[in-house]
Amino acid sequence: MSKKPKTIPKFRSEAEERRFWEAHDSSSFVDWSKAERVRLPNLKPSTTSISLRLPVTLLDQIKIAANKRDVPYQSLIKTWLAEKTGSG
């Protein structure tokens, strides 16, 4: 049997609400028995730019392979990395 969720207090300001949530765990205020699974098909994963030093000859080979596939070489690198790590 699940516990009844706590009642969320009324807040006078956004700052007061922010302080409250910084000090309280929100999970005790949620009735998980009423939760529904959702799909977010248009959600884009966040990305970060990195700097990667490659030997010139390796980069040339990657660019040639990308050119043969008619894709940008950066996209080819991302595809290969995703396949290699299993995250693609």
Image (cartoon, rainbow, N blue to C red):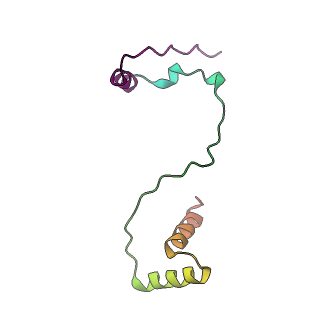
Percent across and percent down for residue 25 are 45, 24
**Above or below — where is 70 with respect to 37?**
below
Percent across and percent down for residue 76 are 55, 73
- Classify the position of the C terminus by image quarter: bottom right
Q: Is residue 44 left or right of residue 9?
A: right
**Above or below — where is 16 with respect to 75?**
above
Q: Is residue 4 magenta?
A: yes
**Above or below — where is 87 with respect to 43?**
below
Residue located farthest toward the front when viewing the structure as drawn: 13
Q: On the image, which quarter does residue 39 sit in?
A: top right
Which residue is at 37% across, 74% downward? 53
Q: How many marks?
A: 0
Q: Is residue 11 magenta?
A: yes
Percent across and percent down for residue 82 are 56, 63
Which residue is at 43% across, 14% downward? 10
- Classify the position of the N terminus by image quarter: top right
Q: On the image, which quarter does residue 19 sit in?
A: top left
Q: Nearer the viewer, residue 60 or 43?
A: 43
Q: Nearer the viewer, residue 31 or 83?
A: 31
Stretch of the chain drawn in magenta: 1-23
